[in-house]
Amino acid sequence: MDLYDIRGGGLDVIREESEHQELSRESTTMEPYNVVSDRGGRADPGRFHLPESEIVTIRNQLQGKVAEMESFAGHLEEIFLTVEENFGRQEQHLEQHYNDVLQTLSQRYDERSAGLEEEKKGKLEALYSQLLACGQAMDASKELIETAQEIYRSQDKRLFLKVIEEFAKEDIDLTLTTSLEFNTPLADLSDVKTMMDSINVVPVINPQMPNSATQTSLRVCWSLFSDDTVEYYELYYRPVLEDTPADTCAPHVSNIKVKETHCTVTDLLPNAQYELWVTATNTTGISPASEKALYMTVPSPPVIKQRECTSCPEAALIRWESGNTNPVDSYTVELSETGTDGTQSGVTESIVAVPTCQCLIQLQTGRRYLISVRAVNIGGPSDSSEVITVSTTGTLFYLLEDSAHPCLSISEDGFTIFYGDEELPISAVALDDTFTRCVAVLGDLIPVRGRHYWEVEVDDGTEYRIGVAYEDTERNSYLGANNTSWCMRHILTPSSWSPDLRITVNPVRIGVALDYDRGSLSFFNVDLKQHLHTFNAHFRNYVQPCFGMDNPGALTVHNGIEAPEYAFI
Amino acid sequence: MALTQVSSNKCAGGFQKVFEHESTELKCKMKFAVYLPPKAETGKCPVMYWLSGLTCTEQNFITKAGSQLPAAEHGIIIVAPDTSPRGCNIEGEDESWDFGTGAGFYVDATEEPWKNNYRMYSYVTEELPKLINANFPTDPDRMSISGHSMGGHGALICALKNPGKYKAVSAFAPICNPVQCPWGQKAFSGYLGSDKSTWEVYDATVLAASYSGPQLDILIDQGRDDQFLSASQLLPDNLIAVCSEKKIPVIFRLQPGFDHSYFFIYSFMSDHIKHHAKFLNA
């Protein structure tokens, strides 16, 4: 944080404030004049009386300034704390650095003094032994002289010459065994010098700035609070892996050399945490490494699952895949309304802190919306996912393909089911969710308790059963034949069944109207606008549309249709 | 045409009234019931004509059918005429309960001594609507017709013979094919003579086979335990077969446990009025 910037800005604020304070003082001091003039009886409202609206305006301005001052004060406090923190760190480093230097020096001192001690000992020993030798030699000489004197006094002159000869043979070494000089090696303090000259200040790596990261890159900034010259900085980074056992090799550390105090690291993985640290280098060497900072790249954008999104006139349910292997913190859903000609109205809404991969959004009826999702972690929000268009005309749903009986095949667009003539292949395995007896499939209706309408198109000769069922309706039971489903079943005559309803015109397009509040499920022949039947039932749970086929044929679901008037009278 | 109010009772937010008038078609005094819903006080309402069955007067429907509440809810005026001319002193008119008094069969008789007075078809389709439209806050373009048993037969033939005149039609246990059932044969031979070709113009099943006109949507409720159904007086299968052939939309509901009585009518009256309202209030 650069103190200079803050200081400049802050003063501006203060200056403005004082101006306003003067103004306010003026306004308040004007009051007494007003009062006086009133008391005096000669009220001159035009001249001295300050109109109320201006007072209000000034008051509002002052309130605004107070708020600004408060936030400025808060800002200052933050700076204060950061400065204290930074300086604390610097002090620590300085202490440590000098401790190191002192330690090195005292080490050298110990070495040198030990060396000196050794030398002294050596020399003394040598001299002492020389001294001893000298002493011995002197004693021997003295003896010799005495002997010589004795012999001189004696008669045998030949013996005297013999001894003298022996004596003369001996050489006395009179040179000193040791040198007179001290052997003082040059102190090697180069490394200490280096230490003193080196950048002893540790670079400070900044915490991650919001919105500075992308999916594959991080923008890292740092600073060096020192007058030392820097040739270059070296930024090191490695990914933080979630669960690395202690003895496996650590992830590879990469590094970049830069001259500036910032760097954009690229080629990173999305939604990943990285450890970064930086050193500064000049001719004297490399500074100690900064503290390790943790940065996180932004996640990859989510992928909206089109076939699992569903909507109705009042709401939409959007489901998506995270798009990231590791968890993210939350999701943000963004929506904007679009006009019928494709232009965006610019009205946008963001729903933040969505914890799971789905979101139920309240919407207005009869509009079109563009909806997209972002994944969010501490590095920031990801890019927006692909946009999905939602229309709040009628109810839209896809089929729950996992629930389809093995004999049913579903068209590519997901709205037509076919019941073929072929024998059920033995290899066809029924999954947990599929219907096993009734050749049927469920729809994925939005869980909103309002009014829903959809249409079913069939061939003239098709026998089918359609309606709604609870999501957990028995999969090995027949739709309509239990108390968890409500169906209208179309049978061709002649039939052994005694029908509830006989009709003269087979519907090929059936409208189904579900009203949770009224507790009704109605069926209509859409082409004739003819009401066929209504169930009155209280649906205690949410229901799903169900479609079953009793003879081979095709059935198409049409939805996203505004309910006709007669559907809900 | 002078109307005399016979009675008026506040009912379901509106008024159930009975009027009497001198009929020009039937040449006698005739009573009819009119229910005026609350909406009639402030605006024009559509009209549903109800034709009652054998032995009924204008009283049975208004006291037993439970029509007033749904009529009030949907804002529909319900007119219920009598089932035959009264007090004409025709010989033999009171001999049977299924012929003569209380059994007009909604035809214009051509045989003596009936042809002078027994003109219920014209009364219901011409005179009565004119009278109603002149004296009550009605929308003359929005009429529908319904009935029970003989009245069901009456409703069906009026709708089939007058394409576009009635916006909706429904029936309770109607006599669908009178030329084939004992009731119809007795009444038609009496009113229309022995030439069966003259009967066909008053038979719903025959009329349906040659119907051409705006699309109808016929709702029929029939009690499964109706003694007259099992006595082959009603013959709905014949009508259904012809309508299936001609693609005339019919919803035929066989209601288990129900008989021919007004208890049956009461149970499904609101469904029928709702059906009529869909077309009358469109």
Image: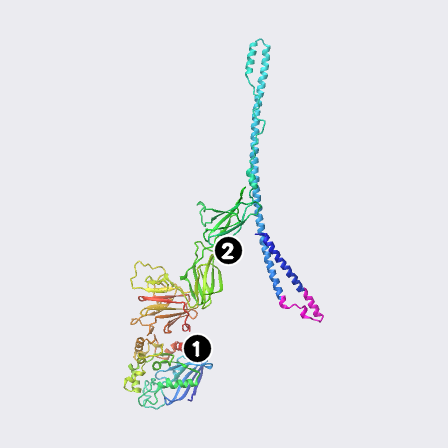
| Callouts 2 and 1 in the same chain | no
The residue range painted magenta reads A29-55
Q: Chain of mark 2?
A: A
| Residue occupied by mark 1 | B73
Q: How is the image coloured?
A: rainbow
Q: Amino acid at mark 2?
A: Asn
* Image quarter (top left, top right, bottom left or bottom right) of the C terminus of chain A: bottom left
Q: Is residue A313 left or right of residue A152?
A: left
Q: Is residue A359 left or right of residue A13?
A: left
Q: Is residue A220 above or below residue B251?
A: above
Q: Quadrant of residue A128?
A: top right
Q: Let me know if residue A303 appears in the view.
A: yes
Q: Is residue A38 magenta?
A: yes
Q: Amino acid at mark 1?
A: Glu
Q: Is residue A289 above or below residue A159?
A: below
Residue A469 on image: x %, y %: 38, 66
Residue occupying image coordinates x 30% and y 72%: A493
Residue occupying image coordinates x 60% and y 55%: A8
Residue A467 on image: x %, y %: 37, 68
Residue A299 on image: x %, y %: 46, 55
| Residue occupied by mark 2 | A211
Q: CA distance from mark 2 to mark 1?
A: 62 Å
Q: Quadrant of residue A17?
A: bottom right
Residue A18 on image: x %, y %: 64, 59
Viewer-nearest of discs 2 and 1: 2
Secondary element at tag 1:
helix
Badge 1: how crowded within 10 Å, few (<14), some, or many (20+)?
some
Q: Is residue A108 magenta?
A: no
